[in-house]
């Protein structure tokens, strides 16, 4: 009886995995369709959710608690973020992550909020590091993003495309491709080839620069946290949907139990980690 049950479960898991791999080849095509508004609830996603549980998304608040960097990234302890037009970068990063967390958890996604220090070998379905830029050049503006170059897994380019397309479309910001730096492509939080405190190589990881604090139009866009977070939420859910890893929760919003972890000790972060 037990052997029969185990066998059936193993066969089901194998069939779902095989089906998913087959379909993963079409993920890019599906992403385009989803972002064009032609989304379909996937039964495969529901079965995978039942087998694996809800997807987990890690959101890093750029520069938060930078003073806690370990020895291997000690030089970053003074990397406390940009400042322009009376606004601290970390305040924008925190406000956007807070709102994005609220939205994703309502959509049934489990969320980890991370400070500057990433737990060793951190694993999730998605890792996003949220930042805002600033420049001495008052004309400079726009959004940009990067994964490690070369990519560490085949999902990183798909995640990047999802974010770029959803964010650029929603914000109307220019794509600041010319200023994607080597530092972004070798961002410490996903430099798993040289650092212990980094996301695992199989965790699709992207750093996002939401816009320039130093440009009034970019700043106004970022300060409207609801629209900034909504653009990122759409990107993350489109990516997970394309991979058949997420389907909208059944029932009403009240039926969804938020699952949020704050991966920083001896701190508080209302409303997720009360003081
Ligand atoms: Zn930053």
Image: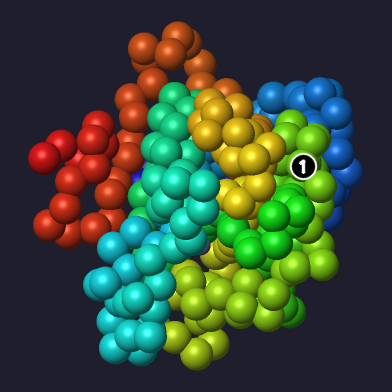
User: Would you place residue 198 above or below residue 166 in this image?
Assistant: below
Residue nearer the viewer, 193 or 116: 116
- What's the residue at 51%, 47% (across, down)? 85
Residue 234 locus on image (x, y percent):
65, 33
The relative height of residue 151 versus residue 7 in the rendered view (above or below) is below
- Quadrant in which residue 241 is drawn: top right
In the shown orientation, is residue 242 left or right of residue 72?
right
Residue 147 in sight in this render: yes
Residue at image mark 1: 173
**Does residue 128 lie above or below 111 as drawn?**
below
177 lies left or right of 132: right
Extreme-top residue of the structure:
252
Q: Along the line of sight, which residue is nearer the eye, 160 or 71?
A: 71
Q: How is the image coloured?
A: rainbow
Residue drawn at the location 28% of the way across and 56% of the way down: 263
Q: Where is the C terminus found, in terms of image quarters?
A: top left
Q: Mark 1 near ligand 1 (CB under 8 Å)?
A: no
Residue 266, x across and y down, in percent: 12, 57
Q: Residue at x 25, y 72 (%)?
A: 68
Image quarter hosting the N terminus: top left
Query: Residue 31 appears at what percent x and percent y?
Result: 80, 41
- Is residue 22 visible to the viewer in this orientation of the structure? no
Depth check, front residue: 215 or 169: 215
- Can you give x and y, in whole percent of width and height, for residue 176 in the image? 78, 58
Per the image, label 1 sits on a secondary structure element best described as loop
**Depth check, front residue: 47 or 155:** 155
Q: Residues within 10 Å of mark 1 (few under 14, many from 20)?
A: some
Q: Is residue 239 left or right of residue 269?
A: right
Count how many numbered circles sit on residues in the image.
Answer: 1
Name which residue lies at 86% across and 33% down: 33
């Amino acid at each position: 009886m037990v052997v029969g049950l185990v066998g059936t479960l193993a066969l089901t898991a194998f069939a779902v995995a095989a089906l998913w791999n087959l379909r993963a080849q079409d993920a890019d095509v599906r992403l385009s369709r989803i972002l064009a508004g032609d989304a379909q609830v996937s039964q495969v996603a529901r079965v995978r959710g039942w087998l694996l549980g809800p997807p987990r998304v890690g959101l890093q608040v750029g520069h938060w608690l930078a003073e806690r960097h370990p020895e291997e990234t000690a030089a970053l302890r003074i990397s406390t973020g940009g400042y322009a037009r009376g606004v601290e970068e970390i305040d924008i990063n925190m406000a956007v992550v807070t709102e994005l967390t609220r939205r994703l958890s309502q959509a049934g996604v489990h969320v980890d909020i991370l400070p500057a220090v990433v737990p060793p070998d951190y694993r999730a379905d998605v890792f996003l590091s949220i930042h805002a830029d600033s420049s001495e050049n008052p004309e400079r503006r726009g959004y940009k993003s990067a994964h490690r170059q070369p990519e560490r897994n085949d999902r990183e380019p798909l995640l990047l495309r999802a974010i770029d397309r959803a964010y650029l479309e929603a914000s109307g910001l220019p794509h600041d491709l010319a200023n994607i730096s080597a530092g972004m492509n070798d961002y410490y939080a996903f430099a798993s080839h040289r650092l212990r405190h980094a996301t695992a190589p199989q965790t699709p990881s992207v750093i996002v620069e939401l816009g320039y604090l130093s440009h009034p139009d970019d700043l106004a866009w970022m300060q409207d946290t609801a629209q900034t977070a909504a653009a990122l939420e759409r990107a993350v859910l489109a990516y997970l949907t394309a991979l058949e890893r997420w389907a909208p929760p059944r029932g009403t919003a009240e039926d969804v139990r938020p699952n949020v972890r704050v991966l920083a000790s001896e701190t508080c972060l209302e409303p997720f980690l009360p003081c």
